Image (cartoon, rainbow, N blue to C red):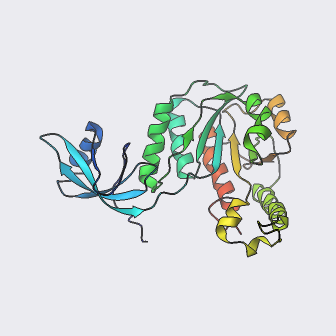
Amino acid sequence: MIRDFAATRLFLDAPLAEEAAVDLDARQANYLVNVLRMADGDEVLVFNGADGEWRARLTAAGKKSWRVIAVAETRPQTPRPDLHYLFAPLKQARLDYMVEKAVEMGAGRLRPVITRHTQVTRINPERMRANAVEAAEQCGILALPEIDAPLPLPDIIGAWEKTEGNRRLIFCDEGEEGADPVAVLAGLREADRGIRAALPLPGGERVGVRGLDPVERSARHPPLAVLIGPEGGFADDERKLLRSRPFVTAISLGPRILRADTAAVAALAVVQAVLGDWRSRG
């Protein structure tokens, strides 16, 4: 199916099905009618994070009221990406940017982490969700990310193996020197490939990873999480805690000191390119 990248996309917080009619709120109606100059009968793409993407017709519902009516499904619902993004909250403008870019880069769960040097300890989950929705509308994403409440770093790490299973945590460590992050992640990929190849299939036989179908390969790929620290970096005891855990892999993000929101884009890009959905999972 050919994607229509030029079409306007709109998130609707309502069930979607053929001929479903959804009233637009004032902000949505203003955007479509007054900003984009759309008229009665024009079409948009709509999604709700659960029922796929639909082609819908804009319809006047009164003097100043508008609704959309779902006409046909254009894409079935996709699952939420299984990539967790853990981050120290930032001041609002930079947090807005970070959330937007993390969603664009494929994060399926946003997990605020309170560290020793975190300057902001409270978040506005509704504002984070609004930024996530805007990113999804712009990027063709169908599944919105989960948004967690903030938790202290020691609590998250202490409970990791119990709550996260075999999920690997990629720790972006400003103190890591010299190691090429692509090489480090590629090493993880090769080690993981060998482990997966030795796993028995349901019938008991063993088969190389390339002998598995894409769904089976994906199911056998250990899930990932990425951790970015605050503007002031991690404290020494936090770095020691992280480096002591077998599920943690530390990587460098290069020779320059990056702002936390820039580091988010850099880290997610390299992880997606080497281990994530930017490459074949074979």
In the rendered image, the quadrant that contains the C terminus is bottom right
Q: Tell me what residue is drawn at x 52 percent, y 51 percent.
A: 104
In the rendered image, the quadrant that contains the N terminus is bottom left
Whole-percent x, y for residue 281 in the image: 69, 66
Q: Does 108 sit above or below residue 78?
A: above
The answer to which quarter of the image holds residue 274 is bottom right
Whole-percent x, y for residue 201 in the image: 78, 67
Q: Does 236 sit above or below residue 180?
A: above
- Whether residue 6 is visible here, answered yes or no, is no
Residue 134 is left or right of residue 191, and the answer is: left
> Of 109 and 31, which appears nearest the observer?
109
- Whether residue 110 is visible here, answered yes or no, is yes
Q: Residue furthest left?
A: 63
Residue 40 is left or right of residue 126, and the answer is: left
Q: Does 49 sit above or below residue 228?
A: below
Residue 237 is left or right of residue 142, and the answer is: right
Q: How many marks?
A: 0
Q: Residue furthest bottom?
A: 211
> Of 20 and 97, which appears nearest the observer?
20
Whole-percent x, y for residue 94 in the image: 53, 36
Whole-percent x, y for residue 49 in the image: 46, 49
